[in-house]
Image (spheres, grey):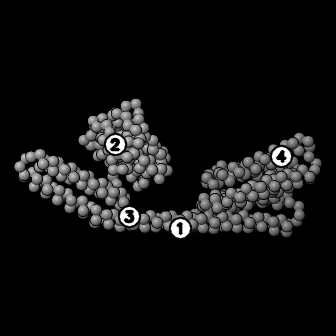
Amino acid sequence: MNRSSTWTSWPSKEALARTAHTRPRAAIGRLVWTAVLVGLLWRTLAEGGFALWQVAVLPVGVAGCAVAGVAFFRSTLAQRLWPSLGLLVLLMAAAFGAQEAGAGALAVVLWGGCAITALERLPLSAAVPLTAVALAAYAIVESDGWLTTVITTGSLCLGGYVLRLDAEARGSARRLLDQERAARVAEAGTAALAERSRIAREIHDVLAHSLSAQLVHLEAARLLIEREPAGEFRDLVLERVVAARAMAREGLAETRQALSALRGEMTPVEDFLRQLVAGEAAEVLVAGDCRPLAAEASQTVRRVAQEAMTNARKHAPGATVMVRLEYLPDSVALEVRDSGGRRSEGELAVSGSGYGLLGMRERAELIGGTLEAGPGEEGFVVNLRVPA
């Protein structure tokens, strides 16, 4: 960093924020500052010589200075130069007012505080002139001798600059800690992705190859059966082989989707839903701003949609199905509604492959979501909502 940027740059936001303070430590800090203000007010009143209206106004002035100080800290945290300078000038003006009113202790504290906080929280090009004005005002009103004044002003300058360096050091340490945490998270994510890729390879080598081989043999069996003379037995066997081939093809497609999920290469959920209902008496509606979903949320939406469509085919054949996907600010909602006959939860829970309504609900709850299912006005409705 060159000399020019050193003078014009702000302290880092980590240094100004002081986020490392724990809640008990912050409470102790507020208690200490409150005690300091009360003690300062008491010391000022003990100096005596105040009119009644001054005694009444003095606590209000001290409270106003405290509010201005808090506003100054927040303004510097936002790195807003002119509001910060205005608030500091206001506090220095309050110090001159306190000095004129006879509250010398309050004026000295305000001048010293302005000098230290300016050096600690402002760019040096703005902090140095303000600190010089504050300390010059203090030196003018101080009557303890020039040596004491020089020592005091020098100590205040040194203290403010040391506080600045200390805050920067803590800020740098906090940034390094955040970077280390981010690196650990990235490393864990990389390791998880590598493990998922390994599992995907194993599934592909075993299950996908096996299903592909089954499809080849089933297709060969279908061709051989079709060459035989027509008959009841032949037609029955052919029907079973064709059904088995369709199931194997569907299983292979599901396996490929699972492999894509493990590798983090899933198609968008809305595209998957449109593919799912292709050729069906169904419609897909998408609401909200589409965005990529986490693997767990995406997989849950897909599985629930598949199971809901399977149930609609089995228990309401020929019914119209409406699938609605809505992207919410902190979640995603899926609604699958059919226009078929009413069914009970118990019937659904034991239907099909055994996944059923119970499995859908458990899958949603595992990632902090909810699932509600039951008869609607014209059939059955499944409502899923998961964090995303």
Disc 4 target residue? 59
Question: What distance separates the C-alpha of mark 1 from that of mark 2?
Answer: 48 Å
| Tag nearer the camera, 4 or 1 | 1
Disc 3 target residue? 196
- Which amino acid does the dot numbered 4 rest on? Pro
| Tag nearer the camera, 4 or 3 | 3
In contact (CB < 8 Å): disc 2 and disc 3: no
User: Which of disc 2 and disc 1 is earlier in sequence?
Assistant: 1
Disc 1 target residue? 180
Pinpoint residue 97: horizontal percent, then vertical percent: 82, 48
Disc 2 target residue? 311
Pinpoint residue 279: horizontal percent, then vertical percent: 24, 41
| Tag nearer the camera, 2 or 4 | 2
Question: What distance separates the C-alpha of mark 4 from that of mark 3?
Answer: 66 Å
Q: Is residue 388 visible?
A: no
Pinpoint residue 280: horizontal percent, then vertical percent: 27, 40
User: Which of disc 1 and disc 4 is earlier in sequence?
Assistant: 4
User: Which of disc 3 and disc 4 is earlier in sequence?
Assistant: 4
Q: Quadrant of residue 285?
A: top left
